[in-house]
Image (cartoon, grey):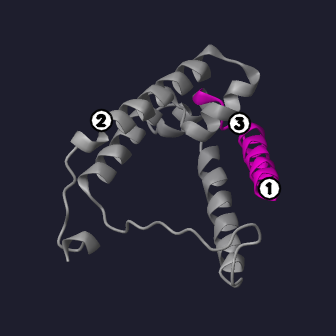
Amino acid sequence: MAKIVVAFVCGFIFGFGLVVAQMTNPEKILNFLDFAGAWDASLAFVMAGAVITAAIGYRLAWRAKMPLFDDSFHLPQKTHVDARLVGGAVLFGIGWGLVGFCPGPALAALSFGGWEAAMFVAAMVAGMLLFDRFSTRIPQFVSAASPRAR
């Protein structure tokens, strides 16, 4: 139960921070990506703050023998870059550039109800379900550096 409460509180703080920083406003994001027009650098400051906070958090977390609310740290098992990762990153970037939403801010934006956020979240969920259904048919290219290639 403690894990659920901590996850909820962390998610709430994250969402609140996104709202305060206006990252739930797609126009703010699109203006950040518009270098030739009404460029808005505020997203760069939000990202810099997030990187600094995460760096401090990771340094503190790695000093502990185990997490406070779990038996062990859960690290990513995949460490190689493959076509699926690159394709997903490209798809994410295109979507972000077209509509100005990414998953976290879109979910936070649902709290004040715009149809744009609801439409984005519906499309995101549909994409996740389609990927889950058809991901076994997407080829996985294994590089020589991949642990699976050895």
Q: Quadrant of the N terminus?
A: bottom right
Residue 38 falls left or right of residue 23? left
The kind of residue on which mark 3 rests is Gln
Q: Residue at 61% across / 32% down in the picture?
A: 106
Q: Earlier in the sequence, mark 2 or mark 3?
A: 3
Q: Residue at 38% across / 38% down in the picture?
A: 132
Q: Earlier in the sequence, mark 1 or mark 3?
A: 1
**Foreground mark, 2 or 3?**
2
The kind of residue on which mark 1 rests is Val
For disc 1, the neighbor class at 10 Å (few under 14, some 14 to 19, many from 20) is few
Residue 147 falls left or right of residue 79? left
Marks 1/2: CA–CA distance: 34 Å
- Confirm whether the magenta stretch covers residue 117: no
Q: Position of residue 97 (x, y in %)?
A: 44, 34
Looking at the rendered structure, the secondary structure element under dot 1 is: helix
Magenta range: 1-26
Look at mark 1 in the image and give the residue it sits on. 6
Q: Position of residue 86 (x, y in %)?
A: 30, 51
Q: Earlier in the sequence, mark 1 or mark 2?
A: 1
The kind of residue on which mark 2 rests is Phe
Residue 146 is tagged as none
Q: Residue at 38% across / 65% down in the picture?
A: 78
Picture quadrant of residue 51: bottom right
Q: Is residue 141 visible?
A: yes
- Confirm whether the magenta stretch covers residue 7: yes
Q: Nearer the viewer, residue 94 or 147?
A: 147
Looking at the rendered structure, the secondary structure element under dot 3 is: loop
Look at mark 3 in the image and give the residue it sits on. 22
Q: Quadrant of the C terminus?
A: bottom left
Looking at the rendered structure, the secondary structure element under dot 2 is: helix
Picture quadrant of residue 47: bottom right
Look at mark 2 in the image and give the residue it sits on. 134
